[in-house]
Image (cartoon, grey):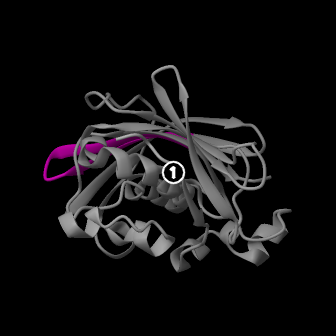
Amino acid sequence: MPVEPWSVIALNLPEHARNAIHTDEGAQAAGFPRALVPGVTTYAYLTHPVVAAWDLDWLRSGGGEVRFRAPVFAGDTLRCTPRHDGDDVIIDALVDDDRPRATLSVTCDAGPPPTMRSGEPLPTREIRLEGEWSDEYGSRAGDPLALYSELGIVHPAVWPALANHLVHTELARGAWVHTRSIIRHHGVGRVGATAIVHGVLVDRFQRSGERAVLDVTIEIEGEVVATLEHEAIVALS
């Protein structure tokens, strides 16, 4: 099926207030007019047209690179608009003009799990895929696709959300911003399973604040289900 446009009103989930940038007060302290919507929620919206068209095939073995180019604010009407670059499908997140707030460059075949690069190992986390880490992530954020609850599998936005959990608990100092991810699917995650999240801090550098780049591998019952290269501004000043 072709990938079709889709629109949604962007919103914040209660748990995102853990990062002050997703509250009006914290966003204004950082120089923004109102609360920013998390990159992982914008990513959830961008996946909707892809999953609506390609279903389980993409969830099992696809992926893509998402880049966050400008803030999406709570209450924005976000237009997820597909375009083609040769054989590639790109989904733009548009608000009030033709300048994308975020882009998702989609791949149908993520390939085998890559080897994690060398760097500083982060503590391994065991997280049960329920509540905010479950099939409900998308529906609570405004993605109405029913296949997640029907099949009992987690929303694909859970994978970068787990990487964000490592950033928030291990690296961030105050408000922080997710900037990009390369996300590769190697399987689906069943609701109620326990995910083992491994992370390595690969790089730190200065650009519009202090940035960190992580490699993240997520396993369930000994099988890799997702891998990510994940970047965030972990200190805004």
Mark 1 Cα shell of 10 Å, populated few (<14), some (14-19), many (≥20): many
Q: What residue sits 60% from the left and 75% below the top?
A: 17
Q: What residue sits 38% from the left and 38% below the top?
A: 63
Tell which residue pokes out farthest to the bottom in this image.
14
Q: Is residue 120 left or right of residue 177?
A: left
* Main secondary structure along the magenta-highlighted residues: strand
Q: Is residue 2 above or below residue 38?
A: above
- Residue 192 position, x and y percent, is 20, 70
- Residue 70 position, x and y percent, is 73, 49
- Residue 76 position, x and y percent, is 70, 66
Q: Quadrant of residue 157?
A: bottom left
Looking at the rendered image, the quarter that the N terminus falls into is top left
Residue 133 in sight here: yes
Residue 128 in sight here: no
Tell which residue pokes out farthest to the top in this image.
86
Q: Quadrant of residue 12?
A: bottom right
Looking at the rendering, the stretch of residues picked out in magenta corresponds to: 213-231
Q: Quadrant of residue 168?
A: bottom right
Q: What residue sits 64% from the left and 64% below the top?
A: 37
Q: Is residue 146 above or below residue 119?
A: below
- Residue 178 position, x and y percent, is 60, 51
Q: What residue sits 25% from the left and 42% below the top?
A: 57
- Asked whether residue 174 is drawn in magenta, I would say no
Q: Is residue 111 above or below residue 146?
A: above
Check disc 1 and report the residue beneath it: 46
Q: Nearer the viewer, residue 127 or 9?
A: 9
